[in-house]
Amino acid sequence: MSGVGVDPVLYSKYHHLQERDVNDFLHVSASFLNWGNLTNKVVMDVGCGPGNTSSSWFLTIFPAVKRLIAIDVQEEMINLAKVLNPQPKIEFMIADISDEASVECWEGTINKVISTWCFQFIKDQHKSFRNVYNLLKPGGEAAILFEINSSYHVCYEEITKSQKWHKILESKAGEYPEIYTKNVDAAHFKQLLVGLGFNVVLCTKKQKSFVFSSDDDCIGYALSMFAWHKRVPDELMEEFRRDLLEEFSKYGGRDSHGRITVHYNLMNILVKKPS
Ligand SMILES: C[S@@+](CC[C@H](N)C(=O)[O-])C[C@H]1O[C@@H](n2cnc3c(N)ncnc32)[C@H](O)[C@@H]1O
């Protein structure tokens, strides 16, 4: 996996922001795409992470689903998911959605693909959307949610370039996923998806905000989405946490209860492969 990366252990604990949005998105998808109870349907969760959010929420909403194949490119995520969320209907597998060879064993066999908070990490999105298309059966559908063009990433930029931390992190700065900050609009994705042969049901960018319940939740989130923090030596980690939290509070300010807020954008995509 390229880029900034997600920290498996921290993400398995600090995913309250994602959890809220995944739950909302799955309900919206179900209503737009007329998903009933999905009995006998085979579903794939792309970029399942430790399994607490997308896969587990999906099974809670659709307990009658036949089988859920949950893939992730990081072996550590899959190992953690198997320990944290063992469920007979979920099959956790290591696979890379941007690599055709890695997913071709499921080609044409999937009824629904879901993917939440994953596509922002993928360099070749065109290839990955094409692979999603090929995975689906005719008439199959995909619900894909990912972060795009979010202002709070300036906090990581400030830290990465700061005098204090740039020696440890600077060599990584060029690898920061540009989709986080790049101003790509929904029309770009719509064109890409139509070009691949999908019927587009929904393709919109939505502004979101999230208020962290505590500083611990904020810094947990901030570190979980910035696995490069592992380059910081143990003896400097406390200072790094303080500086990153300071950036987040400078960026979003604190509300009257002292809580920090972040603002971000999510691309919401619902598509159907023609029958
Ligand atoms: C932020 S986590 C999201 C986990 C979960 N879907 C959720 O909504 O909370 C993003 C996951 O996408 C995975 N990922 C990134 N690129 C991927 C790829 N090319 N193929 C499969 N998984 C990928 C990462 O390893 C990471 O576990």
Image (tube, helix red, strand yellow):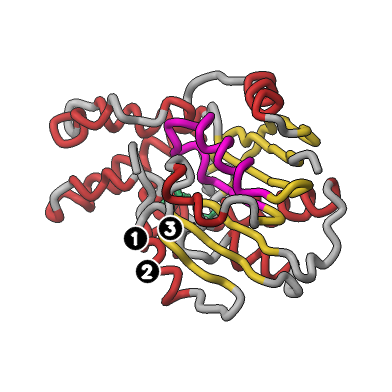
Q: Is 138 drawn above or below residue 75 in the view shown?
A: above
User: In the depicted view, which residue is nearer to us: 31 or 228?
Assistant: 31
Query: Residue 79 got which mark?
Result: 2
Q: Is residue 161 visible?
A: yes
Residue span colored magenta:
113-136
- Nearest to viewer (mark 1 / mark 3): 1
Viewer-proximal residue among 27 and 79: 79
Q: Which mark is residue 11?
A: 3
Tell me which numbered mark, 2 or 3, is placed earlier along the sequence. Answer: 3
Q: Residues within 10 Å of mark 1 (few under 14, many from 20)?
A: some
Q: Quadrant of the C terminus?
A: top right
Residue 126, x across and y down, in percent:
53, 29
The answer to the question of whether label 2 and label 1 lie on touching residues, with beta carbons closer than 8 A, is: yes
Q: To which quarter of the image does residue 53 belong?
A: bottom right
Callout 1: SS: helix
- The answer to whether mark 3 is within 8 Å of ligand 1 is yes
| Front label number (2 vs 3) | 2
Q: Residue at x 41, y 64 (%)?
A: 78
Instruction: Measuring from the top left, give residue 229's x and y in whole percent.
Output: 26, 46
Which image quarter: residue 3?
top left
Q: Which kind of residue does numbered mark 3 sit on?
A: Tyr
